[in-house]
Amino acid sequence: MSQTVTAAVAQRDNGAQALIAKYRTDFAQVLPSHLRPTTFVRLSQGLLRRNVKLAEAAERNPASFLAALLECARLGHDPGTDQFALVPFNDRKRNTVEVVGIEQYQGVIERMYRAGAVRSVKAEVVRAADPFEYAPDVMDRPGHKPNWFADRGELIGVYAYAEFFDGSTSRVVMMNRETVMAHKAKSRGATSEDSPWQAWEESMWLKTAVHELEKWVPTSSEDRRAARDGTADPAPVEVPRVADEVLDADLVEDDHADHPTATPTGDVR
């Protein structure tokens, strides 16, 4: 038994692990300047050591694994974090396995901040009992004062907007239940019992609104906040916490799927 496990570990480390190291230069070419190639490679290899399903999918379909990592690098995220997930996807009907790279809504918000134009980003769901008011012709942003400690009722809508440094407000993205459900209907596997739409419904509503907000707010893979602040170099980037869990391979949605680990309330930073 121990020999079998040892052989499996050796195959994993000599396969996908070696593949990451082999393409280190490719990652370096697309990574923005605020991320170090050595850190990116180390985090990528660490994911394989800690997630058997991901390692197996990477071995079976290395092309999809590399494509997901390169997309993660291009967007300027560390892999396997709240910002960007690498998820093994098992298509049982076609008997194929691939690794899907998913930029989560936290990652989109981070790219908004990197562009250096926004002071804050707000994304929030609206429930049936929430006091809510928004008149676009006279209000630059919604008036929303929920009672966080009461029964707020079912989800009826979601909104997102950004505040710029000059005090102005971006376009306010507003979505009612019908609109959100239309997005959900296009997501593969959304009706599955263990789908993120079932287990993390509120966060999936937020994700839908934030992706729409991206059309109206500047984003950047390169961190430009230092230039706005007038500092010489960006502040040191801390290595983020790497998510321990990976979505079940049969529950992944399309390229807008999400595996949220936290739900923001108020300003998202």
Image (cartoon, rainbow, N blue to C red):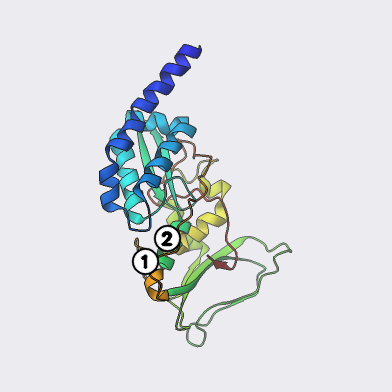
Residue topped by disc 2: 108
Relative to 244, residue 155 above or below: below
Q: Which residue lies furthest to the right in this view?
A: 150
Foreground pick, 158 / 27: 27
- Residue at (35%, 36%) from the top-left corner? 98
Residue topped by disc 1: 219
Residue 238 pos. (x, y %): 48, 54
Relative to 37, residue 128 above or below: below
Q: Few, some or many C-alpha atoms within 10 Å of disc 1 (few <14, some 14-19, many ≥20)?
A: many
First in sequence: mark 1 or mark 2? 2
- Residue at (40%, 21%) from the top-left corner? 10
Q: Which amino acid does label 1 sit on?
A: Thr
Label pair 1/2, CB-CB below 8 angstroms: yes
Residue 39 pos. (x, y %): 40, 46
Residue 82 pos. (x, y %): 49, 51
Secondary structure of residue under mark 2: helix
